[in-house]
Each structure stands twice: as C-alpha cells, then as structure tokens.
Image (cartoon, rainbow, N blue to C red):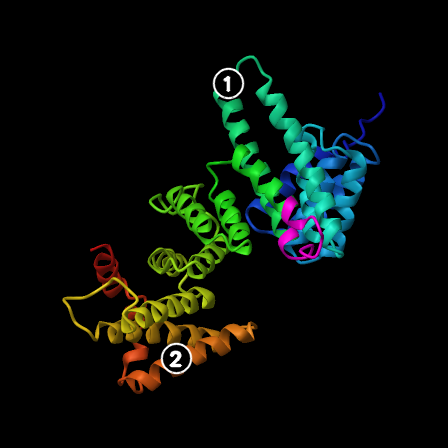
Amino acid sequence: MAPSRPNKEAKPSPSTLLSDAETLHTVGKLQDAIPVAQQALELTGSGGDHELRALNLLGILHIETGDTDDARSFFTRAVKLDPEGTLEEKIGGGPEKFLFLAQLSEEGGSDSVQWFEKGASALRKRIQALTDLPSRTPEQTEKLSTTQSHLGSVLCSVTEVYMTDLSWEEDAEQRCEALITEAMMIAPNSAETWQTVANVRISQERYDDARGALKKSLELWQDKDPLDPAVPEFPERISLARLLLEVEMEEEALRVIQRLTSDDDQSVEAWYLGGWCLFIIGEKMRDGKHDARANGEADEWKSVWTSSRQWLAMCLKLYEAQEYEDERLGQHAVELFENINKELGPPKEGETDDWDDASGDDDDDDLDEEMKD
C-alpha cells in the first residue's frame, strides 16, 4: 500500500481574501489590506467573478493611503468590466467607480462632469427599477430613499463644478438650474440639496430665495442627534456657515458654528468663522443695525466683541500650531483681532487664554435669547 502524501495547504479563495481585506479596511489597517486585496485580484484572474470587487476595493484603499494615481488606474480598469454601472453591488457593480473618477480627475471641469453624469445615470436606473416594483419590502423602500439621496448629492456635485471650473460656459447657469431642479424633486429631504440651491441663488443675487433655501436646509437636521445621518458632514456645515454669513443670517450661523466647535475643537476654520460672526453681530449692534438689546445697555456690543476676540485668539493659536496653509483666513483673523483692539484696547490679562469660555456657550446662548426677543 502506497504511503499517503501529506496534504498541501489549500490556497485561500479570492472571496476569502477579499473578505479579509475588507475587514482590515474597516479597522483602519490600510497597509495590511492592500497586499491581501492585491493577492485576491491576482488569483481571480482576468474576468474572474471577484475581479470587479477587488479592483474597487483596491481603488478605495489607494485613495485612503493618498496614492491617487494607482487609485485612478484601478477604477479605470473597473469601468471596463461594468461600463454602465448596471452590475450587482455584491460583485462590485454600480456607480461608485464613476464618482471616484470624477473626484480624481486630473483635468476636472468637463471630465469630472462626464464621470459624475455616468454615475447619475446608473443611479437613475436603480431608482427606476425600485420604483417599478409592484410592491416593496421595507428594505427596498429604504434602498430607494438612500439611492435618491445619493443621486441628489451627485447632482449637487455637478452643480458645484458648473459654479466653479465651468462657470465660464455659456449655459452654466441653465445647467445649474436644471440640476438643482432635479435635486429638489428627487431629494427634497436632503440638507445638501437646499444648501446647493442657496449657493446658486446667491450667485444669482436672489438673496431672499437663498435665505429660504438655507432655512429649509437647517430645519432638516439642526435639532437632530449628532449621529443622525441627516446631519451633514463637518465640511458641509463649514460651507453652510459661510453661506449663512453671506446672506446676513448671523444668528443661525452662530448656532451652526457652536455645534462645529463642539464636534471638533481643533478646527481653525470653525473658530475663525465664530469670531467673524460675533464681530459682525457686535458691529451691527454698535451701529444700531441689529435688533438685539441686552437690558437696554448701549455698550453690549463691546461684550460681543470681547467674545469675538476670544474666538479669534483661539483660531490664531491653532493656526500657528497646525501651520495652517490658508493665508487669507489667517490675515483676515488678524485684521479682525486688531480692529477689536483699536476699539476696546488690548485684551485684559488672561482674557484670551480662557479657552473654556472662548466658545461662548453661556454668553452666546444669552445672546441667542436676546435676539429672539
């Protein structure tokens, strides 16, 4: 009887490797995940069942490690396997690769729009398929809502391109109008939709309409828990605060900014916007252009400017510590700080070191109440 041969250790399947790579990605071990995903790609072979899934995962991993050239290469290969984004999600199909390529585009402008539109087209097909179902399960209903919000976000992204890189195009305004109209129809419960509408209306100098859109945006999330998915991401809320200041909605801007510093007390831009917002409020109070009054005290604006100076001091401290690169922001913060000093004199000893008070929670809450009266 021939002796039995030792069993060779079975090679892991591409599916197992991809699951392992996805787990490593989830826990933040990006450098460990990349070779595992690469091995899965090599094992699946050209046209294999797991090739598309591996390419998308490798694209995402390389984005997160800052290797955008390789990320672009992986997503471009993925497009060849799913050119319309109609394959199933479980094997890596769908619109995401188009949307990543739009953001990774070296040319920007029309090239980004082209990729965004391919992604939007794939999302529209998914929405149509879900809409055409004679009846939907709760999961399918949730999927429809999520996909509609996703499409709305893509339409907002295209609008931003037409307002920046392609603003010189003759039909830029018409394209923006068409895009936000579709976004309002498909994703009316998205704060991002109404924020983008406001941005377009500001560019058209339709400020009352912009204020109305910003109010709708705020109503959708401002009273919700910080972890609620309706609450916009931090950068979106920074942009929102800027838009609110642009249309002179300082009270609303202050509440947004206070929440920003609660979420991230190391954000240079949030402290800067808070200081600027309080500066504007104090200036209006000083010049008799603001309805807020505190016990009839004519010098209440000085208290508001003191709070402004604290916010700006915190901004400048973080600006220096982080070697922040936005020179215009730094210059404006210094200018505001110096203007306050000219009116109020230099800060009192310890005033700008009291960082717990710099957020102005108590004082600014009092100010909020005064503004409502």
Q: What residue is disc 1 on?
A: 137
Crowd around label 1: few <14 · some 14–19 · many ≥20 (10 Å) = few
Crowd around label 2: few <14 · some 14–19 · many ≥20 (10 Å) = many
- Alpha-carbon span between mark 2 and mark 1: 57 Å
Query: Which span is picked out in magenta?
Result: 162-174
Q: Secondary structure at mark 2?
A: helix
Q: What residue is disc 2 on?
A: 337
Q: Position of residue 3 (x, y in %)?
A: 82, 26
- Whether residue 119 sits left or right of residue 341 in the image: it is right
Residue occupying the far left of the picture: 295
Q: Name the one closer to the observer, 347 or 280.
A: 280
Q: Main secondary structure of the magenta part?
A: loop
Q: Name the one closer to the observer, 335 or 60.
A: 335
Say which quarter of the image contains residue 344.
bottom left
- Answer above or below: position of 146 versus 364: above
Q: Secondary structure at mark 1?
A: loop
- Whether residue 191 sits left or right of residue 355 in the image: it is right
Indicate which disc, 2 or 1, sits on the residue closer to the N terminus: 1
Q: Position of residue 83 (x, y in %)?
A: 78, 35
